[in-house]
């Protein structure tokens, strides 16, 4: 049985490698009843988009405040 | 002061970008911030940015839109940063992180003894991240969170998510096992997620701002 700690590890790993069938099944079952891990999984994807967007947005026109 | 190029013909637009000092200064500043975050070395970062900028601007004439030029410049910059990391890697010994099983007690602030979320650490639904991405305050929070990560975790995270290297590429670069890279990415993501949630996607508010 997967606990949240192990589920979050798989939710991170699946951004970097394909999960095995067994891992996938255990994860899916865990996510059915765990809203925290469901949120965590969504955040993993959003963080990837955020990181990729860093060049397009974050490094983009910053506000006119600040030093210069 | 400096004029921004209006919508002239596309031929004229080419020259306008290179003569637009304000645009180039801002571009350089953005590149520098992006690079310093990853190399943590201002002098080296300035060299890398300089090199990327010179290389990129040789072909600037083929871009008529600033956004396209910026994407191009950053693509070159990513390669230069990867080169710099590769060279430096030989000088800095990378610590082999301990494996997962070794520290069951890890993140004991987040998970209880059964490996279940502790109440206050339970991840919440985030507000619209797309909206956040247009907000400069959000990016300052993001950078601050990145800087809070232990250096090695931040480095591996950025290689993966900013430079978009694959796990095997990172393993080769840093002479780490694949598991070590996965563990490091996991740790970095858990901490970064927590930091963003606590400082930006605050409980009950979707666009709380730190100032």
Image: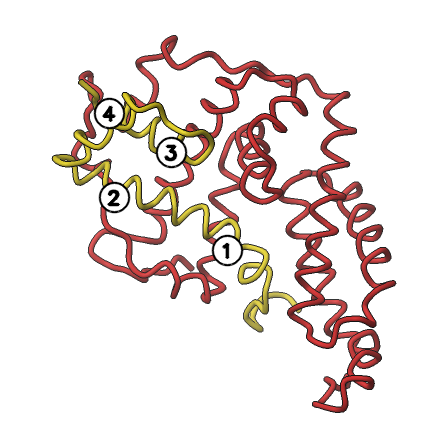
Residues behind callouts 2 and 4 on a single chain: no
* Residue in the picture at 84% in, 79% down: B15
Name the residue carrying label 1: B140
Q: CA distance from mark 3 to mark 1?
A: 19 Å
Q: Label 4 lies in what chain? A: B
Task: Tell me the mark number nearer the camera, choosing from 2 and 1.
Answer: 2
Name the residue carrying label 3: B190
Binning the other alpha carbons within 10 Å of mark 4 as few (below 14), some (14 to 19) or many (20 upward) gives many
Q: CA distance from mark 2 to mark 1?
A: 23 Å
Q: Is residue A51 left or right of residue B47?
A: left
Q: Label 2 lies in what chain? A: A
Q: Label 1 lies in what chain? A: B
Residues behind callouts 4 and 3 on a single chain: yes
Name the residue carrying label 2: A39
Task: Tell me the mark number nearer the camera, choosing from 3 and 1.
Answer: 3
Name the residue carrying label 4: B111
Q: Quadrant of the C terminus of chain A?
A: bottom right
Residues behind callouts 2 and 1 on a single chain: no
* Residue in the picture at 42% in, 46% down: A47
* Chain-order first, disc 3 or disc 1: 1
Q: Position of residue B24 (x, y in %)?
A: 76, 69
Tell me, yes or no, whether the two marked residues, 2 and 4, touch with CB atoms within 8 Å: no
With respect to residue B13, does B21 lie above or below? Answer: above
Q: Position of residue A6 (x, y in %)?
A: 29, 22
Residue closest to the eye, B156 or B206: B156
Tell me, yes or no, whether the two marked residues, 3 and 1, touch with CB atoms within 8 Å: no
Chain B, colour shown: red
Residue closest to the eye, B166 or B210: B166
Q: CA distance from mark 4 to mark 1?
A: 28 Å
Task: Tell me the mark number nearer the camera, choosing from 4 and 1.
Answer: 4
Task: Tell me the mark number nearer the camera, choosing from 2 and 4.
Answer: 2
């Amino acid at each position: 049985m997967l606990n949240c700690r192990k589920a979050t590890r798989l939710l991170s790993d699946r951004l970097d490698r394909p999960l095995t069938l067994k891992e996938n099944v255990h994860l899916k079952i865990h996510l059915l009843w765990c809203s925290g891990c469901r949120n965590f999984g969504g955040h993993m994807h959003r963080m990837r988009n955020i990181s990729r967007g860093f060049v397009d947005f974050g490094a983009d026109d910053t506000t006119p405040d600040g030093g210069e | 002061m400096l004029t921004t190029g209006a919508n002239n013909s596309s031929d004229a637009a080419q020259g306008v970008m290179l003569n637009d000092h304000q645009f180039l200064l801002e571009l350089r500043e953005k590149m520098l911030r992006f690079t310093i975050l990853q190399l943590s070395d201002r002098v080296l970062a300035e060299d890398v940015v300089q090199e990327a900028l010179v290389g990129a601007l040789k072909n600037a004439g083929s871009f008529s839109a600033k956004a396209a030029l910026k994407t191009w410049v950053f693509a070159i910059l990513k390669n230069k940063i990867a080169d710099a990391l590769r060279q430096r890697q030989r000088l800095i010994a990378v610590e082999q992180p301990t494996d997962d099983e070794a520290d069951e007690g890890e993140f004991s602030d987040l998970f209880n003894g059964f490996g279940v979320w502790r109440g206050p650490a339970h991840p919440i639904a985030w507000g619209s991240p797309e909206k956040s991405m247009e907000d400069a305050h959000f990016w300052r929070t993001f950078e601050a969170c990145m800087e809070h990560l232990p250096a090695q975790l931040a480095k591996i995270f950025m290689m993966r998510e900013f430079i978009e290297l694959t796990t095997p590429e990172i393993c080769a670069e840093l002479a780490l096992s694949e598991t070590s890279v996965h563990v490091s990415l996991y740790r970095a993501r858990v901490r970064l997620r927590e930091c963003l949630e606590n400082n930006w996607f605050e409980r009950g508010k979707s666009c709380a701002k730190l100032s």
